[in-house]
Amino acid sequence: MKYLLLLLFTINIQSQVKDIFKYATIYGAYSQNKAIQPNKTFYVTQESELIETTQRNSADQIKTFGFRKLAHFGYEDKERFYDGEEQNNSLNSNIGNVKGLEYLFEYQEGKQQGNDFINKQFFVRYLAKNWIAKLEYNKNELVDINYKSADVRFRLPINNKLSFSVGAVYRTYEKAYGHNPIQKYLENDQNNWWDLSYSYGHNDVLYQWQNLSTGQTGYDYFWYNEQGTLLSNSDLDYRNNIYGQLVNQYNAEQLALIGEFSDLSAVIAVDYYFYRKNYWVHTYANVLPKHKLINGDEKYSYGTFIGNDNWLDYSVGGVFGIRLNKKIGLFAEFTNQKYWDREIKVIKAGLNFKI
């Protein structure tokens, strides 16, 4: 009898594990596109030698690796190969097309406009009739957002189309959103803008210039890095093309010293999904109207930056489509997420005509 119970228990565990991975997909992809190049820039020496100083951008590229189990909605292409760039609305909406467990584990690294980036998104959600639980980790260096969240809600389904939910979201994040260290640096009367350049090893050399046509003369500065490489041939060019890189580096270093934050936020949400072969509507909205700082330096919290704990975070989106006849179809899609002072917005609309 003991061995029979052990056998039944083992079979039950194996069945549950098999259900977790049933319909899951492992995928990988690589894409490359030519990057947008800046206008050519030049430097002319005293000997009239023309030297091109254009900073060329290498090709945009992205590598994606992922493991996912997400149910498609009726309007989504079930036969499409995953490449990591498709938009699956199960991630954004609060309910999937099926009850139970859904998940996504995705890693991306690449280069855009000469800048390296790494994106990570981990998503696990369990949908039941009257409750929703979700864990998420989202790091997107292209829009500079990085947070982890745990979400628990009570759910009230009105019918097969409409669903309301209310609950709480616990979010942790490493950046003091809203705060700008360089602003405080420059507001200090003891700091000049070029002092920041000196602190990063950049040096300026004064020179005199003359306009040969008008005879006008003046003074400006060459800028060099620690290795003696010419960075810019004027203050204006240096501030326009080089100084911003130092500002970004300074901000990142100063914000990293502040430490991590944790917020507990109330959340109210609504989802609507209606699908027919020739027309469909899928919309969702999440509103986080009230927040409580749980961990972190209150002086640098987002609530302190805003002036209260009642700022409005939200994520909304929708998909609309209609087939007018066998040849013509219209579609529209939008998503808009605003967390703290970071906003991600995507809008698509179009017409399909089959010949």
Image (cartoon, rainbow, N blue to C red):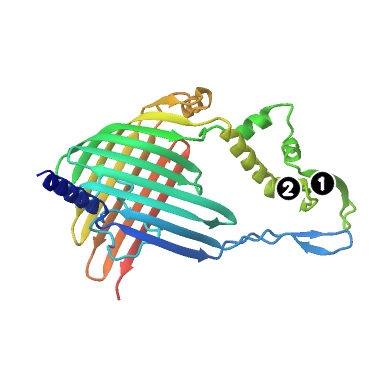
| Residue 162 visible, this orientation | yes
| Residue in the picture at 51% in, 35% down | 175
Q: Position of residue 271 (x, y in %)?
A: 25, 43
| Residue in the picture at 41% in, 38% down | 148
Q: What residue would you read off at disc 2?
A: 238
Query: Camera-side residue: 29 or 223?
Result: 29
Q: Is residue 244 above or below residue 63?
A: above
Amino acid carrying label 1: it is Tyr
Q: What is the quadrant of the N terminus in the image?
A: top left
Q: Residue furthest bottom?
A: 355
| Residue in the picture at 34% in, 43% down | 316
Q: Residue furthest left?
A: 1
Disc 2 crowd rating (10 Å Cα; few below 14, some 14-19, many 20+) is some
Q: What residue would you read off at disc 1?
A: 221
- Residue 156 got which mark? none
The reply to whether discs 2 and 1 touch (Cβ–Cβ < 8 Å) is yes
Q: Is residue 79 above or below residue 253?
A: below
Disc 1 crowd rating (10 Å Cα; few below 14, some 14-19, many 20+) is some
Report helix, strand or loop for mark 2: helix
Place residue 250 in its image quadrant: top right
Mark 2 and mark 1: Cα distance apart in space: 9 Å
Q: Position of residue 228 (x, y in %)?
A: 80, 51
Q: What is the quadrant of the C terminus in the image?
A: bottom left
Q: Position of residue 280 (x, y in %)?
A: 23, 55
Q: Position of residue 272 (x, y in %)?
A: 23, 46
